[in-house]
Image (tube, grey):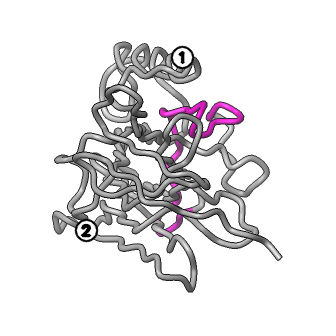
Amino acid sequence: MTSRPKRLIVACAASGALLLVGSTAAQARETGGANRERVRASSYINPDAGLPTENSTVTPGSDCFRPDRSDTQQFSDPGSTARNVHNDACFLMGDRMVDGPASFESRGVGSISACPDPDGAGLGTATLSDTNGDGRMDLCFQTGFQDKVNTAGNGEFHTRLNNNTGIAGRQTVVFCSDSDQDGCSDETVKSTITIDWNADGVPTLGNGGGQIGLGSFLSNLINNLLSSLGLSGRGNG
């Protein structure tokens, strides 16, 4: 019989109640103080190693602690999600995973193609919506992290991103603590990934739709290096 970890309430200023995975209670506040740990968000692109959606341009081993936050991806065929990108995320307090309501919010080209229920038949729920009426799903709200018996990815939040429109450009996806279920613009505990979509999935230096400007290329490179060192070049992670 598999035992599940206990979840204890942790106060988190400005982002609502979060739950700490573990057996002892701790208090976290977004602005730290003496004897307080800071809850942070960490979003990353999952390389999906060994799966049909395996993404060879993503750093092997990319995860919440060593995130790769930028990718260049080939369009999916019209009507298909075959080349979707797997975006995962965590709330972290030190090296511990923290639970709580969260959203993935997409802007730019592309859309959110999957927003899985976090615990199957349990009390957790997920809601996928089109907030601006343009016909593309852009907000995935989940009441908590994945918590399924004997399932890989527990303790993390999951979503899938896709672009089958043939429109090149950048998709920016923000993951955040979202107790009021209205997206990430008013939140402070958040983390961002970017995907540059084009016809062949090959990174290109230059300007124009679907190409990566030199400044953006260098910025992505620096952010990934900082992330690998446990630092961050993008605000909260």
Characterize the local packing of mark 2: few (<14), some (14-19) or many (20 or more) Cα atoms within 10 angstroms: some
Q: Mark 2 points at which residue?
A: 130
Identify which residue is drawn at 71% across, 60% down.
Answer: 152
Look at the numbered disc 1 and give the secondary structure of its residue.
helix
Magenta range is 58-81
In this rendering, the answer to whether 74 lies above or below 72 is below
> 132 or 96: which is nearer to us?
96
Q: Nearer the viewer, residue 111 or 102?
A: 102
Indicate yes or no whether the magenta region holds residue 77.
yes
The Cα atoms of the two marked residues, 2 and 1, are separated by 34 Å
Q: Which residue is drawn at 68% across and 68% down?
A: 4
Say which residue label 1 marks.
225
Q: Is mark 2 on a helix, strand or loop?
A: loop
Kind of residue at badge 1: Leu
Q: Quadrant of residue 197?
A: top left
Above or below 131: residue 45: above
